[in-house]
Amino acid sequence: MNVEIMSGDGFVVIGLLYRGRNENREVPALWGQLMPRMGEIEGIADAGVFYGVMGNYDMATGEFDYVAGAEVLPDTPVPEAMVRWEVPPGTYAVVTFPFRAIMDAIHYAHQVWLPESGYRHTGGPEYEYYPLSFEPDDPKAEMQFYMPVERV
């Protein structure tokens, strides 16, 4: 897998929140809950582009927050039972990979690339980027994982 270092602008995501360890595929189920509710989100910045934002990791329990959502304009109201998450601007290690290899790509970024890279994780939120062309049923569908980093 190839990792690129890129600068990223900050942005705001509105969507549904899950907190847990994803032991029973709750994250994929969250996407299924979001899609019928997309019409409730006003001010979408780029229709058809989606983000999975992750953070607030608890190393003791393995729990984390995950928001399945879309980028919105800054003053967009938050629909009932949804949340708003601001992703700050920064430097990111970016891995592009086939959707079916999502867990392998995240593992690779954290466990293989990062320890040898000369970078460290900044502790900010990570995110998955699903481009407009993304089709989850297409075995060739590609997406990206963004991990916030800084030089050691």
Image (tube, rainbow, N blue to C red):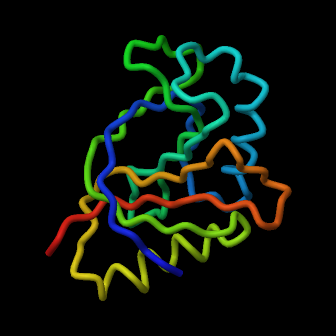
Q: Residue, x 53% and y 15% (percent of image)?
A: 43
Q: Residue at x 56, y 24 (%)?
A: 82
Q: Nearer the viewer, residue 61 or 64?
A: 64
In the rendered view, would you say 146 is above or below 102?
A: above
Name of the residue lying farthest toward the front:
133
Q: Quadrant of residue 123?
A: bottom left
Front-most of residues 54 and 58:
54
Q: Residue at x 73, y 58 (%)?
A: 24
Please say if 103 is above or below 83: below
Q: Quadrant of residue 34?
A: top right
Report whether 97 appears left or right of 26: left
Please state the horizontal and vertical placement of residue 71, each as a whole percent of the image.
Answer: 50, 31
Considering every residue shown, the one lying at the far right of the view is 137
Q: Position of residue 134 (x, y in %)?
A: 71, 50
- x, y (%) of residue 151? 17, 71
Residue 16 falls left or right of residue 31: left
Residue sitting at x 67%, y 61%: 142
